[in-house]
Amino acid sequence: MSEKLNNVRQSALAENLRTIGYALLIALVIRAFFFQPFNIPSGSMIPTLLIGDYLFVAKYAYGYSKHSLPFSPPIFDGRVFSRQPHRGDVVVFKKPTDNRTDFIKRLVGLPGDSIQMKHGVLYLNGKAVPRVRVEDFVRRDEYGNVQRIPQYRETLPDGVSYNTLDLIQDSEADNTGVYVVPPSHYFFMGDNRDNSADSRFQNEVGYVPFENLVGRAEFIFFSTNGSAHFWQFWDWPSSIRWNRIFSWVD
């Protein structure tokens, strides 16, 4: 009887281990080929994305490279099933200077484009990208202090429109030389123009190879104001930004 009970227990354990293994495999496949969760850790994409936003990134949007897989194993070069990104896409990519760190920015320059900033205005192939002043972006700190930041609605030639911030007038990042995007590379900028490490800073980010693109940001599935982590469900009622949940990333 004891031997039979042990056999039943071992069979149940083996079945549970198989179930866990299948679940992990399915999760790995979904993460590698379909959707990857991503948390916004910095304010470089304000007002589009806020610190504490949790979003899904579509891994299939541009095809697959070694960076589509966890830890970027060097099993092949280039991309398979590749699709070209579009200006205005919000993209997660591996920072070219270390090929390890995940960055999220907006794609503003395609291969062959010339990019320049003049007095806070984006110039694309020699033409100013239209921008219109809209209501200030209002930010409140933990002490209730209010900061109003000039906000502009920018519209790319492709018709993609989004808001940007201009925190510091005529800052170093507001006035640059001309960048010419090399073949098979892309130029990215944060929507928070004066608080973003992006392609304007060649030693830090620079031009991003096609291979380094991880995926396109799709929609926010959770958002907290920073007073609680995702797993601290007991603090959700006071920390969740309900109006951001299930909103698409524009």
Image (tube, rainbow, N blue to C red):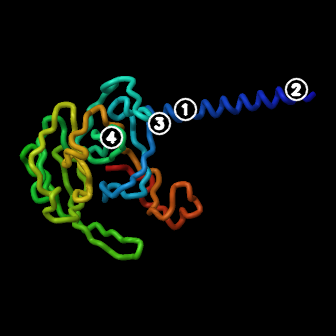
> CA separation, marks 1 and 4?
23 Å
In the foreground, 87 or 13 = 13
- Mark 4 or mark 3, earlier in chain: 3
Residue 200 percent coordinates (x, y): 19, 48
Q: Looking at this view, name the residue that lies furthest to the left.
A: 126
> What's the amino acid at mark 2?
Lys
Question: On the rendered structure, is 117 left or right of 140?
Answer: left
Q: Looking at this view, name the residue that lies furthest to the right.
A: 1
For label 1, count other residues whose C-alpha is less than 10 Å away and answer few (under 14), some (14-19) or many (20+): few
Q: Which residue is drawn at 44% across and 40% down?
A: 36
- Mark 1 or mark 4, earlier in chain: 1
Residue 31 circle label: 3
> CA separation, marks 2 and 3?
41 Å
For discs 2 and 3, the disc positioned in front in the rendered view: 2
> What's the amino acid at mark 3?
Arg
Question: On the rendered structure, is 245 left or right of 213?
Answer: right
Q: Name the residue under label 2.
A: 4
Q: Mark 1 points at which residue?
A: 26
- Mark 1 or mark 2, earlier in chain: 2
Q: Residue at x 76, y 31 (%)?
A: 12
